[in-house]
Image (cartoon, rainbow, N blue to C red):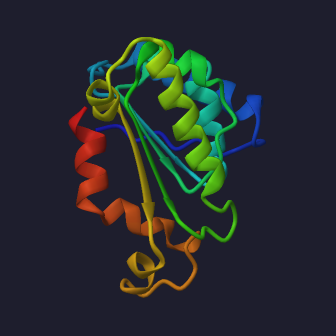
Amino acid sequence: MIIISPQLDDWGDKSANDTIALVEYFLDNYNIDKNKVYISGASGGGETLSRVLGKKPELFTSALFISSQWDGNLNVLANTKTPLYIVIGENDSYYGSTKAKNAYNNLYQIYKKQGMTDEEINKILVLDVKNHEYFTSQGMTDEHAGLELFAYDSNVMNWFFSK
């Protein structure tokens, strides 16, 4: 397993382009199964993930979008149908959950216009909005700070790595 963790230079196209270049470098220079390349991003990293998927979603097997807002091109993502799991707290203290819900709903509608059935969409697109008790029951009072809990959530991680 190779884990690449680029650091943000911005929350825009520079970091997205740098991430794409780094992933392409590894794919070109290392023996990597191209059917097992995953991307996740939380908070500012989620904004970068959305821009990456709005440019080169075909590089990835699936994506995990955590506690963030969507800034990327959903139409580009929809054309590849790269599986996407969106997870956020209902009352995320930094982003709220409305922008993540809107991204999900917009992508869902794009898929419907492409002729996909609800069943087909639900296999590749998930919106998982956690209630406040999810966080407090695990010792977190702030939902944005509690985004680290998702890495230990077997439902989230099993879906992400099963695609």
Q: Is residue 133 above or below residue 19?
A: below
Q: Is residue 89 above or below residue 120?
A: below
**Residue 47, percent across and down?**
65, 43
- Quick one: quadrant of the C terminus? top left
* Residue 77 vs residue 108, the one in the foreground: 108
Please report the residue visible at 76 percent of the width from the left and 30 percent of the height from the top.
Answer: 14
Numbered marks: total: 0
* Residue 136 vs residue 7, the one in the foreground: 136
Please report the residue visible at 31 percent of the width from the left and 53 percent of the height from the top.
Answer: 156
Which quadrant would residue 105 be assigned to in this image? top right
Q: Is residue 51 above or below residue 33?
A: below
**Residue 7, percent across and down?**
64, 46
- Quick one: quadrant of the N terminus? top left
Q: Is residue 46 left or right of residue 155?
A: right
Please report the residue visible at 30 percent of the width from the left and 21 percent of the height from the top.
Answer: 32
Q: Is residue 44 left or right of residue 26?
A: right
**Residue 50, percent across and down?**
60, 35
Please report the residue visible at 26 percent of the width from the left and 40 percent of the height from the top.
Answer: 161
* Residue 138 vs residue 105, the one in the foreground: 105
Q: Is residue 145 left or right of residue 85?
A: right
For the question of whether residue 78 can be seen, the reply is yes
